Amino acid sequence: MAETTTIARPYAEAVFKLAQQQGNLKDWSDRLQLCAAIAGNPEMTSLIGNPKISDEQLAGLFGELCGDKLDEHGKNFIAALIENDRLGLLPEIAGLYEQARAEAEGVITAEVVSALPLDDAQQKKIAASLKKRLGREVVLECEVDESLLGGAVIRAGDLVIDGSAKGQIERLAHVLLR
């Protein structure tokens, strides 16, 4: 995982710089999400590593599948990935691009895993608290995990807040077993 991230990062950074210069972060975001979905498709994955498929054939197929979503810069980017045997990294590249975009736009995604579903008021309160603490706009991704027993675990970037009953019990057990 870390190795693929290391390899994918320069490509994501290059695309991000280009998107900033062009002033179309959203377009590139959409483009990369589409390309990542195509590259992650099992049928496409089998073609990507197939020595019987030439680079030109692979680029042509990718261009057909993307249609008008791929402009000249997009086609050049895909060609560079194919030439360097990095097309399979598109999902990772797209993820890194989204992180860079969110950072540039002052937005952070926070994952909230709770024992029970959160209502709108609870979500707004959590988002407001995180915005105050992190100094950025917060987008919540909420999940339910009944194994937490109660409370919630919040992850936003490097920040982890474990307010779950399960986490409290584990911390108490750790202290008692010392």
Image (cartoon, helix red, strand yellow):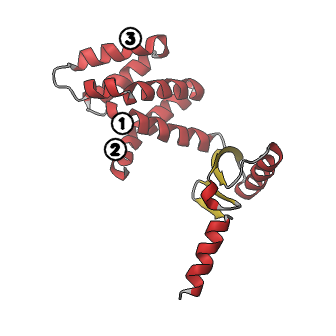
Q: What is the CA distance from the residue labelled 1 to the residue labelled 2? A: 8 Å
Q: Circle 1 — which element?
A: helix
Residue visible at 49% across and 15% down?
69
Residue visible at 47% across and 28% down?
32
The percent position of residue 105, horizontal first and vertical second, equals 65, 39
Inspect the image, locate mark 1, and give the three-letter code of the amino acid beneath it.
Leu
Inspect the image, locate mark 3, and give the three-letter code of the amino acid beneath it.
Glu
Q: Residue beneath label 1, please?
A: 89
Q: What is the CA distance from the residue labelled 1 to the residue labelled 3? A: 20 Å
* Left or right, residue 128 beside residue 163: right
In the drawing, what numbered circle is on residue 7?
A: 2
Q: Circle 2 — which element?
A: helix
Residue 76, located in which quarter of the rendered image?
top left
In the drawing, what numbered circle is on residue 64?
A: 3
Inspect the image, locate mark 2, and give the three-letter code of the amino acid beneath it.
Ile
The percent position of residue 112, horizontal first and vertical second, equals 66, 51
How crowded pointer 3 is (Cα within 10 Å; few <14, some 14-19, many 20+) is rated as few
Question: Closer to the N terminus: mark 3 or mark 2?
Answer: 2
Task: For the residues labelled 1 and 2, say whether their Cβ atoms are less than 8 Å apart.
Answer: yes
Question: Closer to the N terminus: mark 1 or mark 2?
Answer: 2
Residue 25, located in which quarter of the rendered image?
top right
